[in-house]
Image: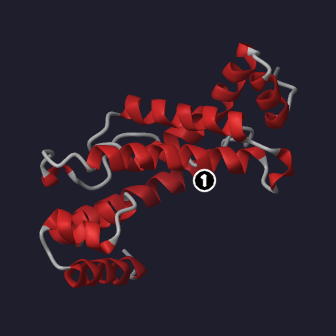
């Protein structure tokens, strides 16, 4: 199975080969964890996020078409991301959940940007981890509470109006907060 391409494995999975899905899962688990990492510490547990990512991979296997113009890796990445974001939106949309659970990115979780099939470069991984740590530290210390909440909701796919309604502020205030976040993120931290 290791010699098969991702596209070939997807075809085998559609034909009912469970070993092919196990091989795809092992190839994409690092990517799934990396895509789920920004949402750790929000409303969803890490295991739930990974499960959603696996369901996204399964969606990719079921719906991938080679004539669609994208590689399977690209298509799977989009499906995994979309599935995780949908789960986040669902969890965030529960009205009885306190807004103070919209916290900055957690300190836990893999920040590894290594895709299945790529060689792990320890130096690159260390630099990426340091960059992510700096970004997390900046978000927790350099942004106001409202800016952090607006940022998390925006990253969760909410519109300005939905953000405003959730935080009981005007759309203009939400837009202004997001503009401040953008301005601050452009500065070196």
Q: Position of residue 62 (x, y in %)?
A: 69, 34
Q: Is residue 154 visible?
A: yes
Q: In the displayed structure, does residue 97 sit left or right of residue 127? A: left
Residue 187 in which image quadrant: bottom left
Identify the residue at horizontal 35%, vertical 84% (top origin): 183
Q: Is residue 114 visible?
A: no
* Residue annotated with mark 1: 124
Identify the residue at horizontal 69%, vertical 22% (top origin): 21
**What secondary structure is found at the residue carrying circle 1?**
helix
Q: Position of residue 128 (x, y in %)?
A: 52, 55
Classify 183 as above or below 49.
below
Classify 171 as above or below 99.
below
Quadrant holding the N terminus: top right
Residue 118 in which image quadrant: top right
Q: In the displayed structure, does residue 117 sit left or right of residue 140? A: right
Q: Decide which of 48, 181 is in the foreground and name it.
A: 48
Q: Position of residue 104 (x, y in %)?
A: 27, 56
Residue 132 in which image quadrant: bottom left
């Amino acid at each position: 199975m290791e010699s098969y391409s991702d596209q070939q494995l997807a075809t085998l999975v559609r034909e009912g080969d469970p070993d092919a899905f196990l091989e795809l899962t092992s190839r994409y688990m690092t990517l799934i964890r990396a895509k789920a990492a920004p949402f750790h510490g929000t409303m969803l547990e890490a295991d739930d996020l990974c499960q959603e990512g696996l369901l996204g991979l399964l969606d990719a296997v079921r719906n991938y078409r080679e004539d669609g113009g994208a590689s399977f890796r690209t298509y799977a990445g989009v499906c995994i991301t979309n599935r995780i974001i949908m789960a986040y939106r669902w969890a965030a949309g529960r009205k009885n959940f306190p807004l103070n659970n919209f916290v900055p990115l957690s300190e836990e979780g893999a920040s590894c940007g290594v895709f299945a099939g790529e060689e792990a470069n320890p130096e690159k991984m260390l630099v990426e981890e340091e960059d992510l740590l700096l970004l997390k530290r900046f978000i927790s210390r350099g942004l106001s509470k409202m800016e952090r909440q607006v940022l998390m909701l925006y990253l969760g796919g909410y519109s300005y109006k939905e953000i405003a309604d959730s935080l009981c502020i005007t759309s203009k205030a939400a837009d202004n907060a997001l503009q401040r976040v953008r301005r601050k993120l452009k500065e070196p931290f």
